[in-house]
Amino acid sequence: MHRTQHGHDDHAYDGPAYDGPAYDNHAYDEHAYDDQAHYDYEPSRDEPDEPYLPGTRPRARPRRRRTLALTAAVLVALALLPVAVDRVVAARIESRTAKAFQQGMGTPEAPEVEVRGFPVVTQAASGTLRHVDITAHDIPAHGSARPLPVSELSLRLDGLTKADDDSEARARSARASAFLSYPDVSGALGLEISQGDRPGRVSAVVLLPLSQEVTVTATVSAVSGNRIAFGDFEVSGGSLPAAGSAILDRIFERPIRLRNIPDGLRLRSVTTTADGLDAEFTGRSVTFRPEEA
């Protein structure tokens, strides 16, 4: 057996290195780490917020959510308020314009009016509406030997202003389209008018003695003075006697004038359709006078 210089045997001790009291992990309760206690801990409302641990979710803040929702609702209401006020002003202008147009044109019902562009409030304050659309129906034609009503009139007005005394309204420029039904055209001419065999032509049936009839077609065109002219006659289905030719000349020799169109609009073209005539107008300084029915 080998001994060191101090007389100890390097291999004589086989027991534990330390014979004192063993270390107990739970011997000191005041310093023990309790995992469950850590996760059950909830800070009081008076404690400041701290970052939450990874893998966990922060606690909900009901009061904060209610405040954010209320703030958002207030902001939305403030944003929509000018739109609502502008819509009220636009509706009032549209109603007054429709009433004035109905009185001036003598329509059985008020027309449809739309003030375009936003905001309308600033347009009204300046005294000029940038764009106004008006669609009227069944405009009569009084004071004419051969009245031709307008079944529908669609107006696109730019730069509409009114006089201080409301005696008239004036558009800087305008475009319009009018629809004239064949029954109304027939009533104005005294002949049954329908669409012709070719574009730009109308057809009329002329009764002859002995229950005979012939079909006459004619061109349709726009002439000065907002008038619709007929010409270039063609006869089919028989020969037209001299008396018949005289009747046609008397009927078509004078163009039909459209008297129920706002002052300042000029007839530019007339086209034929299956149901009637489409007339297109343009004009500058177009005037509406409510007292003129």
Image: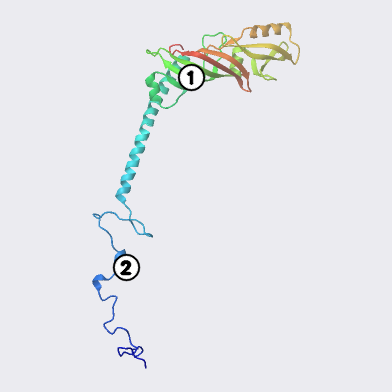
Q: Which mark is residue 11?
A: none
Q: Image point 42% across, 19% down: which residue?
A: 128
Q: Image point 57% across, 18% down: which residue?
A: 280
Which one is closest to the eye, mark 1 or mark 2?
A: 2
- Residue 58, given in percent of the width and then of the height, sits at 34, 56
- Residue 73, given in percent of the width and then of the height, sits at 34, 40
Residue 63 visible? The answer is yes
Instruction: State the residue lying farthest toward the bottom.
Output: 1
Q: Is residue 113 above or below residue 30?
A: above
**Amino acid tagged 1:** Leu
Gap between marks 1 and 2, in whole Å? 80 Å
User: Where does label 1 land, which residue?
Assistant: 157
Visual colour scheme:
rainbow
- Residue 9, given in percent of the width and then of the height, sits at 33, 90
Helix, strand or loop at mark 2: helix
User: Where does label 2 land, which residue?
Assistant: 35
Identify the image quadrant of the N terminus.
bottom left
Estimate how packed mark 1 is, as few (under 14), some (14 to 19) or many (20 or more) residues with alpha carbons within 10 Å. many
179 or 46: nearer the viewer: 46
Q: N-terminal of the two: label 1 or label 2? A: 2
